[in-house]
Image (cartoon, helix red, strand yellow):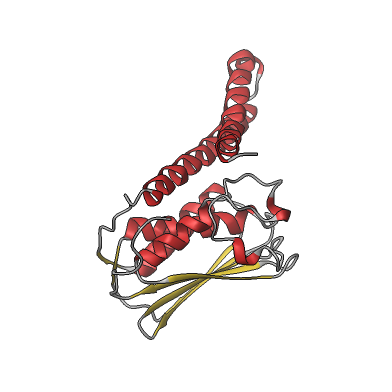
Amino acid sequence: MDRIALLAHQLRTPLSAINALAQGLVRRSERMSAEDIRSRAERIWRASLRLDELVETIMSYTRASTGGMLLNPSEFNPEALINRACREQGNHDPGRPIKIDIRGLPETILGDPILLEQALVIVLSNAMKYSPPERPIRVTARAEKRGIAIRVKDEGIGISEGDLPFLMQPFFRGRNARDYPGTGLGLSLAWYILKLHGGGLQIESKEGHGTTVTLTIPEKNITGATGVL
């Protein structure tokens, strides 16, 4: 499947769900209970969130691939950013345990908080997507010598050793991930955002045994990678 067809397919999936659920509401709302209506409305909402996430990833990738992604740095509180990203992702999947352990972070660091939150959301979303809904996501954050490290650990399908070297390539999808929704753009985009800040993104994984993704963010350096994806 070529890249445009892949993107079209991934966009069509949540659109089809929204269309089918909305049509059901229109046709049968008078015969449905309040609980049935609420259930369908929630499924429409979740599909719309997925669609919004896909569109935002595609737009951000387009900016990055043409050199149009620029940093807008400011001082921000990293603990507040991490908690907000975890809370918002948790709202998408209320039954999912997200265990947060943050210690010793600086009060403020310098960077683009919108882009950094997007990178963290990409990693959190992947952890949730590729692991069973009852298994916890563990998020730890620690101060390092010149910045902070955020680790997101899941207990999901993991990544094969042969696929690990290619995960940062745009549109690449692991062999055991092809039945899951996704464009293959997220990790390459998150990696690029971290590199723009002079940081990095590392992945440790074993197929069938989960994945740990570490985002490293310098406390002040915002003169990292230049160019395009």
Furthest residue in direction right, as rendered: 208
Q: How many numbered circles are shown?
A: 0
Query: Residue 195's spot in the image, x, y percent?
Result: 40, 66
The percent coordinates of residue 87 (x first, y second) are 47, 56
Q: Is residue 174 above or below residue 24?
A: below
Q: Is residue 112 above or below residue 32?
A: below
Q: Is residue 136 left or right of residue 106?
A: right
Along the line of sight, which residue is nearer the eye, 17 or 8?
A: 8
Q: Position of residue 176 (x, y in %)?
A: 73, 55
Looking at the picture, how far across and down is residue 175, in whole percent? 72, 54
The residue sitting at 30% across, 66% down in the picture is: 111
Classify the position of the C terminus by image quarter: bottom left
Classify residue 27 by image quadrant: top right
Q: Residue at x 59, y 61 (%)?
A: 167
- Rendered-image quadrant of the N terminus: top right
Viewer-closest of 169 and 86? 169
| Front residue of 137 and 161 | 161
* Residue at the outermost bottom position: 145
The reply, left or right, for residue 191 in relation to residue 127 is: left
146 in relation to 123, above or below:
below
Taking depth in this image into account, of 88 and 189 the one nearest to the observer is 189
Q: Residue at the spot x=25%, y=57% of the render? A: 72
